[in-house]
Image (tube, rainbow, N blue to C red):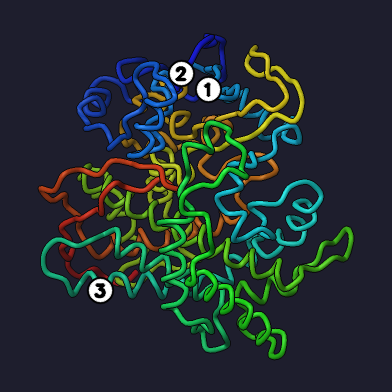
């Protein structure tokens, strides 16, 4: 992206600069070992200035490639391509945009356009008072007590995944396996009836989500340039029949559950049917329920699957890390699948997930539009300016992280040392992801179960590179060699 007036101002840090900077704890031998680690797979960011036609050409392959590489060293970059923009990778700037003055920075219409056509009543898209009352009403459904009640499908799906892997011979398509596992979890959690099975046909849900993510929900270069949302984007011209079928299935599930409430083993659908804004007493309409259910299906399915796929690739690349994580999982679990009761004991597994999310935040770029004039990182922001916040670059910033390109779960030994506005895998502030705790619990349960039973090794295939579509996907499926670890005594 054409850029100018970079700022060199100071910002809070969670570490020292660059891969050759101040050593992490346990200096000497440990520092040398960390320095020798391979960098994790990384995207190719923009290395030099280019014009609008150059940006368009680059964005055809990967929209992330229009983010300047210098954003991993500078706190803010301001410029203009059709519209004024500011690329912010500074914790203090993030605090301002996402928390202290978040009302001035609603989601850009262009960013909401990715989902607005299909899910216009959902929490991801709405703003202002509509968002506030829905968020108040939905928060209890994702409170810890309810997340705990929703975890049995996670354990079941983790067990099924490890059983599938035990039956294969040769390289395994980990991307496919993790998509299936996360899909099984989210559909069971969302629509399960009293027997624990989905009341909506799984094939219809899967086909709709896959098409939507692959075609309709692709981020466009026009979104980044601030081109008005009424300008057509390829792929968003019409609602695909599979999405219509998913909406019809969700509507039918809502109607059926209203007639026959599931009070014994409530699914997410049941919790949302009971959701009420404590301030106003308002409840969601069926259209609002449907769009939120589908939003959770899309977000909960794709993002967790990608996190697990990247995590398994990273531990395959770093055998020492894999051995430590597997040792912890086997000690805690023995020969069984992980449950909600195990999550707090799986400390290192959580660190592996945290570090995976640092390197590959599921939503790697966020767009906001300034509602009024402001100053961010000593740069003047005018009404209508586009704020581009690339969490991908923030998480690899040389000022905020030691060895930023390396996979080092130990950096999360003490979360108190991590600046909460420098590490934002689920966003931050009032619009932090409502399902963050759910997603972390699911990822820990599945990863621990898999590592306790199986070894994962790299194949001779070309390494994947992260690529932005709607989420941060690998540019090719991740394949790994999988082998059994052998028996373990029950915990």
Q: Residue at x 30, y 65 (%)?
A: 177
The residue beneath circle 1 is 81
Circle nearer the viewer, 1 or 3:
1
- Counting residues from the N terminus, which is met first, the one under dot 1 or under dot 3? 1
What is the crowding at mark 2: few (fewer than 14 residues within 10 Å), some, or many (at least 20)?
A: some
Q: Nearer the viewer, residue 489 or 372?
A: 372
Q: Are marks 3 and 2 in contact (CB under 8 Å)?
A: no
Q: Are marks 2 and 1 in contact (CB under 8 Å)?
A: yes
Which mark, by number, is residue 2? 2
- Counting residues from the N terminus, which is met first, the one under dot 3 or under dot 2? 2
Q: Residue at x 26, y 32 (%)?
A: 39
Q: Is residue 451 visible?
A: yes
Measured as percent of width and height from the top left, residue 390 is found at 49, 32
Mark 1: secondary structure: strand
Measured as percent of width and height from the top left, residue 5 is found at 54, 9
Seen as rendered, the residue at the extreme right is 280
Determine the CA span between mark 3 and mark 2. 48 Å
Measured as percent of width and height from the top left, residue 124 is found at 63, 52
Mark 2: secondary structure: loop
Mark 3: secondary structure: helix
Circle nearer the viewer, 3 or 2:
2
Q: Nearer the viewer, residue 340 or 369?
A: 369
Side of 122 relative to 334 (left or right): right
Which mark, by number, is residue 164? 3
What is the crowding at mark 3: few (fewer than 14 residues within 10 Å), some, or many (at least 20)?
A: few
């Amino acid at each position: 992206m054409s850029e100018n007036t970079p700022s060199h101002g100071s910002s809070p840090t969670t570490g020292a600069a660059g891969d050759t900077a101040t050593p992490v704890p346990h200096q000497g031998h440990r520092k040398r070992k960390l320095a020798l680690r391979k960098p994790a797979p990384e995207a190719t960011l923009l290395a030099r200035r280019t014009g609008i036609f150059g940006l368009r050409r680059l964005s055809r392959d990967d929209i992330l490639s229009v983010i300047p590489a210098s954003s991993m060293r500078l706190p803010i970059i301001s410029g203009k391509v059709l519209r004024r923009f500011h690329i912010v990778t500074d914790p203090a700037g993030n605090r301002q945009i996402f928390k202290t003055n978040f009302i001035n920075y609603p989601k850009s219409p262009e960013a909401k356009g990715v989902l607005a056509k299909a899910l216009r009543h959902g929490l991801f898209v709405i703003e202002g008072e509509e968002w506030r009352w829905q968020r108040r009403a939905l928060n209890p459904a994702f409170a810890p007590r309810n997340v705990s009640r929703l975890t049995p499908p996670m354990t079941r799906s983790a067990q099924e995944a490890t059983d599938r892997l035990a039956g294969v011979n040769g390289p395994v398509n980990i991307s496919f396996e993790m998509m299936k596992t996360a899909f099984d979890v989210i559909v069971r959690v969302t629509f399960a009836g009293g027997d624990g099975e989905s009341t909506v046909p799984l094939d219809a849900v899967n086909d709709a989500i896959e098409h939507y993510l692959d075609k309709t929900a692709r981020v466009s270069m026009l979104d980044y340039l601030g081109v008005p949302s009424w300008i057509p984007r390829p792929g968003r011209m019409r609602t695909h029949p599979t999405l219509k079928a998913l909406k019809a299935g969700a509507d039918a599930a809502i109607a059926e559950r209203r007639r026959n409430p599931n009070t014994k083993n409530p699914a997410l659908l049941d919790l949302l049917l009971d959701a009420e804004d404590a301030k106003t007493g308002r409840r969601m309409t069926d259209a609002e329920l449907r769009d939120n259910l589908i939003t959770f299906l899309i977000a909960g399915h794709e993002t967790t699957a990608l996190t697990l796929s990247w995590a398994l690739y990273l531990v395959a690349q770093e055998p020492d890390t894999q051995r430590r994580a597997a040792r912890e999982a086997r000690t805690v679990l023995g020969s069984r699948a992980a449950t909600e009761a195990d999550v707090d004991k799986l400390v290192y597994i959580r660190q592996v997930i945290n570090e995976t999310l640092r390197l590959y935040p599921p939503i790697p770029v966020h767009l906001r539009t300034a509602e009024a004039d402001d100053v961010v990182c000593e740069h003047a922001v005018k009404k209508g300016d586009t704020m581009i916040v690339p969490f991908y670059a923030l998480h690899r910033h040389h000022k905020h992280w030691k060895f930023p390109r390396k996979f080092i779960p130990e950096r999360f030994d003490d979360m108190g040392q991590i600046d909460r506005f420098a590490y934002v895998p689920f966003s931050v502030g009032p619009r932090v992801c409502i399902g963050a705790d759910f997603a972390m619990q699911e990822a820990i349960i599945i990863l621990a179960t898999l590592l306790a039973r199986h070894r994962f090794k790299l194949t001779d295939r070309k390494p994947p590179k992260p690529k932005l579509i709607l989420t941060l996907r690998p540019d090719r499926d991740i394949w790994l060699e999988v082998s059994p670890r052998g028996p373990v005594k029950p915990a």
